Amino acid sequence: MAEDLGEAGHAYNLLELDDRLVHARAVQIAAELGIADLLSEGPRSSDDLAAATSSDPDACHRMLRMLAACGLFTETAPGAFGLTARGAPLRSDHPYTVRSALRLNGTVVPLVIGGVEHSLRTGGPTFPAVLGESFHAYLEHAPEHADLFDTAMSELTQLMLPSLLAVYGFAGHMVDVGAGTGTLLRGVLRATSGTSGVVFDTPRLAERAREAILLDGLTDRCAVVSGDFFTEVPRGGDLYVLKWILHNWADEPAGRILHRCRQAMTERARLLVIESVLPEGPADTGHPASTTMDVAMLVVQGGRERTGAEFTELLAGAGFRLERVVPTSSPYSILEARPL
C-alpha cells in the first residue's frame, strides 16, 4: 500500500519498520503470558484470556487485535480469538516451539536497549558496559535467565535440526563443542545408527545434558565432559562440531577456540562450523536474519557473523582448510573444514 504513494510511501515504509518494535514486544509478551497455550483447545474471548493472565481486559483485547492483524491470531467472533498456523509455534508443546526464545529476547533486550549506542560509538559490546559483566558471566548467577537461555537454544536447535540432517551425513564419533544441553548431538544420534558422541560444555550445562541424555536413553552412545573450550577440548573425535559458537566471539577469541579444536584433532578428523554465512559484496535485502544477528552479536557479546572469505581466513589462522560450505533450508550453513 505504501508503495502506491510515491515518495511519501518511502516515509510510510520507514514508519512501518519502526512499528516492528511494538510488534516484537507484543509477540514477546504473548509468549511470556502463555496466550497460545491457553488457545490450544480452541478460541476464547479476550475477557477470558485477560482473566487467565491477570491482564486488563481492554488492553488484552487491543494487543490480541494487533497480533491478529499480524497474522498470529484470528478474531473468530467479536472479542474472541483463535490461534493461526503462523502463531502456533508460540505454543509450549509445538514440535518447533520458539516460545522460550521469544521470552529470552523479551528479557535480554530491555537490559541493554537503552545503552545500545555504546556499541556504535566504541565497536564493543553493550551488555558488559551496562551490566558490568559479560553475558555468560551474568547467566552464571541469574539462574532463571540461564534456564530460559538454555531452553531457548534447545528450541532453536530443534527447529534447525531437520535441515542439517537433510543435507549432511553425520557419522563416526562426534564431539559437540559448546553443546549446551546436547540437543544437536542427541538429535543426530536418534536419527542415525552407528554414531556416538561427546557433549562438551561448562559444568552447569554438562549436568543438564546428562539428564537429557538419560531421558533419551542414549547413555550407551553419548558421554558428557565438562570444561572450558578456551583451555582444552576432548580428544578422540572423528567429527568436531561448533554450532553457533564462533559468532559469539571476535576473531581473536574465536581463533583460540579453533586452535583448541585443532590440538585435539587427528589429521583425519573433520570440523563442522554451523553458522550463518553473510553474502560477499554489497549488502542486499536477501539476508535480513543474518545481518540482524550480526548487530545483535556485537551488542550482546562483541561477536559477529562472517562471510565465507572471513571464515576461510579465520580457519586458516588456526590450522584448518575450508573445504566446502553446505547450505541448508534454514538460515544456517555447514562449513566443513579439515586440518592443514
Image (spheres, rainbow, N blue to C red):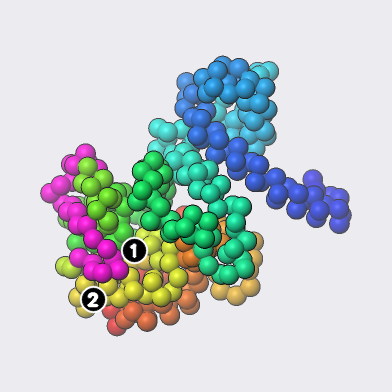
According to the picture, the residue beneath numbered tag 2 turns out to be 263
Q: Is residue 221 above or below residue 324?
A: above
Instruction: Residue at 28% x, 50% y: name it.
Output: 205
- Residue 288 visible here: no
Q: Which residues are magenta?
A: 212-234
- Residue type at mark 1? Leu
Q: Residue 215, how many percent across, how many down?
A: 21, 39
**Quadrant, the C terminus:** bottom left
Q: Residue 259, how many percent across, how many down?
A: 30, 76
Task: Kindly indicate the quadrant of the structure image that contains residue 328.
Answer: bottom left
Q: Is residue 316 above or below residue 260?
A: below
Q: How many marks?
A: 2
Q: Residue 332, how many percent across, how many down?
A: 45, 59
- Residue 224 visible here: yes
Q: Nearer the viewer, residue 178 or 125?
A: 125
Q: Is residue 12 left or right of residue 111?
A: right
Sequence-wise first label, 1 or 2: 1
Q: Is residue 63 left or right of residue 324?
A: right
- Residue type at mark 2? Gln
Instruction: Residue at 23% x, 67% y: name it.
Output: 233
Q: Is residue 184 above or below residue 168?
A: above
Q: Secondary structure at mark 1?
A: strand
**Quadrant, the N terminus:** top right
Q: Is residue 304 left or right of residue 72?
A: left
Instruction: Residue at 55% x, 35% y: name it.
Output: 29
Q: Which mark is residue 65?
A: none
Alpha-carbon span between mark 1 and mark 2: 15 Å
Q: Which mark is residue 242?
A: 1
Q: Nearer the viewer, residue 115 or 304?
A: 115
Residue 177 on the magenta span:
no
Q: Residue 232, how many percent across, how many down?
A: 23, 69
Q: Nearer the viewer, residue 259 or 4?
A: 259
